[in-house]
Amino acid sequence: EPKLSLEQVNALVPAEFHKTFENVIESWPEAAIFCSALLPFKSLPTLINAFENYIDRLPSESKLKILRLYPDLAGKLLDSKQLSRDSSIEHNSAGLDNLAAEEKAKLNEYNERTITFTYALHLCVPLTALIPARYILAVLGSIAMAIIYGLKVNLSVAMVAMLNHSALAHHSAGHDMKQENADAEPVCQGSGNSTEAVEDGPFDWSEPVQGMILSCYFWGYLVSQIPGARVAESFSARWVMFFSVLINVVCTLLTPVAAKMHYIAMIVMRIGEGIGGGVTFPAMHVMLASWAPPNERSVMSAIVYAGTALGTVISMLMAGVLAGTLGWESVFYVMGGLSCLWMVLWLWLVQDTPTKQALMSQEERDLITSSLGTSSSGGHSEAKPPVPWRKVFTSAPFYGILIAHICNNWGWYMLLIELPFYMKQVLQFNIKENAVVTAIPFLTMWFFSMALSKTLDALRSRGKITTTIARKTATFIASAVPMLCLLALCYIGCQRGLAVTLMTIGITAIGGMFCGLLSNHIDIAPNYAGTLMAITNSAATLSGIIVPIFVGQITHGNQTIGAWRVIFYVTIVLYVVEIIAYLLLASGEEQPWNKGDKPAASVEAAEAEATPLNQKESKQNYSAQDQ
C-alpha cells in the first residue's frame, strides 16, 4: 500500500483513521479510536508519541491483555492460517512460514517462556489492583520492621530459657540475705503451675553480663544510623532496607553457635544485628518521604512503624513457645529462617520511588507525585541540596523531636527489653505465661496505633486540626498514659492481674508515637527526613544502651519490687520532660531550611523556572475540563 503523508493522515475523518490505524497495536483498535481524537498532528513523531502515550497510560491488566493477544511467532495461528493480514505479511517477510522442524521447535520453546513470563507478571496485577502500590510498600515496610524488632527482642525471652537460674540464685544468695535485712519488700508468689518453668539453661551469666549482652545491640545500632541515612538519601533506601534485614537474619542464625563459644562472640553477633537494625528507621523515612501523600502520612507511618509492635508480639509468643518446647536454639533458627521470604518479596514488589515502580497504575503514580510536588517522569530526580547543619541544630521543632525521642525511647526500651525479666523475676510468671502476658500489650498497641493514626488523619483532612496538633496529641498520649500506669505500678505490690492490666494500657498508649514524634521528621523537612531520623534515633539509642545496664545494676542480686520501683521512678521523670519539651517546641509545619541554604525567593524562582510550559498548560487544561 502507498504510504500516507502527514497531510493525508490529518485529512482523514475519524472513521477512516480508525480503519487505517486499527492494527498498529495488534487486535487492539481502541488505540486508534483514542488517537483519532488528537487530530491533527503537528509531526510524525507527535503521531507516534500519541500511540506510545496511550500504551503508557493503560492499566497493567490491559497491557498484559495486549501481550497475550499478540500471536506467537510461527505458532498455531500461522499453521491454521488465522493470522491477520498484517501479521501474515510480517511472518512471511521474516521467513517464518518456511521453518525447519528444529527451528520451529526452538521458537515454540521461546513462545512458552514468554507465556510463563506474562503469567508471572500477571500475578502482580490483582495485588496492585486490590491494594495500591504505596500500601504494598507500607505493609512490606511494616513486615521489615516486625522482622528487625522480632529478631531483636527474641533474645529477651530466649535468655530466660538460656540462663541457669539455679546457679545464679546460688551465687547471689548472700546478697539476697543482706537485702532482706535492709529492706523487707513483699515477695510475689507465682500461679499454681508456675513451677512448670523451663529447665535451667547452660549459661550462668550474671545480671551485669546479661545487661551487656542485651545493650550491645545498640552499640552497632548507634554507629550505623547517620551513614545509613546518607546512603539511603543519596543512593537507594530500598537496598539499605534489604541489607538491613539480611544482616539481621545471618547474625540471628549464627547466634546459638556464638553463644556456645563465649559470651563475647554473642556480643559480636548482637552488634552485627544492631548495625543492620540501625539503618531501618532512616531508610524507611526516606521511602515514606517519596511515597506517602501528605494527607496519608500519619496512616502510612503508623502502618510501617507499628510493625515494631507486631514483630514484638509475634516474636515474644513464638520465642516463648519454641523455647519451652524445642529448646532455646530453635528460637533463632526458626525465626531467622522464616524472615528470608521477606527479602524476595521486597526486591520483587518495591522500588525507591513511584517513578521507578512498574507495578502500579499511572493514576496512583500521578496522585503521589503531584501531592508531593515531584516529577512523574522516569528521568533522574533532582539532586537534594546539602544538609543545612547550622539551621538544623538551631531549629526549635528539631529539638522538640530530639528530646521527646530520647525520653520516649527510655520508656519504650525499658518495657520492650526488661518487661520479660520483671514478669519472671518479680511477678513469678513461668516462661509460657511470660510470653503471653508480655506479648498481649504489644498486640493492643498495634490496633491502637492504627485507629489513632486514621482518626487524626481524618480530622486533619477535614480541617478540624492542624498537623502540629495531631503530632502533639499523639505524642502526649504516648507519654502521659504510660507515665501514669508506671506510677500506679509502683504501689500495687504483687497484684499480678492489676499489674498486667496497667502494663497493657501503658504499652498500648505508647503506640501513639508512631503517628506522633516518629512521623514529625517528614513534616518539618521531607528532604532530610532520613538524616533527621538518624540524628534523633542515634541520640535516643543511648537509652537502649543504658537501660539494660542500669536495670542490671539496680536489680543485681535484688530482684524486688523496691528495686524496680526506682527504675519506674526514673522513667516517670523522663516522661514528664518529654511532655513539656514536645508541647513547647514541636511543630508539624515544613521548616524554611528544608530547601537547603538557598533563600526562599530563589527557591521559588528555581521551581518556577524548572516547570515546563507545556506542563503548566496541561494543568490549566485539566482544570478547565474539570470545571
Image: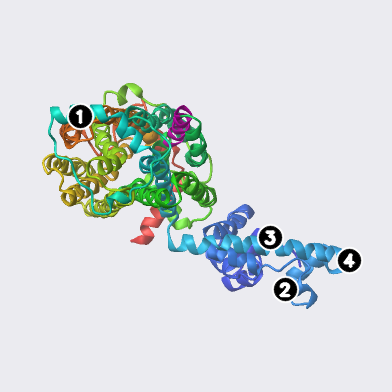
Comes first in the chain, label 4 or label 2: 2
- Of mark 3 and mark 4, the one earlier in the sequence is 3
- Report the mark closest to the observer, 2 or 1: 1
Q: Cα distance, mark 4 to mark 2?
A: 23 Å
Q: Which residues are magenta?
A: 263-277
CA–CA distance in space, label 2 to label 1: 95 Å
Q: Position of residue 143 (x, y in %)?
A: 42, 49
Question: Which is nearer the N-term, disc 2 or disc 1?
Answer: 2
Q: Main secondary structure of the magenta part?
A: helix
Q: Quadrant of residue 543?
A: top left
CA distance for labels 3 and 4: 40 Å
Question: Can you tell which of label 4 and label 2 is closer to the viewer?
Answer: 4
Q: Earlier in the sequence, mark 3 or mark 1?
A: 3
Q: Which label sits in the foreground, 3 or 2? A: 2
Find numbered disc 1 in the image and state the secondary structure of the residue it sits on. helix
- Residue 553: percent from the left, percent from the top? 27, 27
Q: Report the amino acid beneath label 4.
A: Ala
Q: Which residue is mark 4?
A: 100
Disc 3 designates what residue? 5
Q: Foreground residue, 470 or 45?
A: 470
| Vertical position of residue 210 compared to residue 481: above or below | above
Give the mark toward the camera: 1 or 4: 1
Residue 528 in view: yes
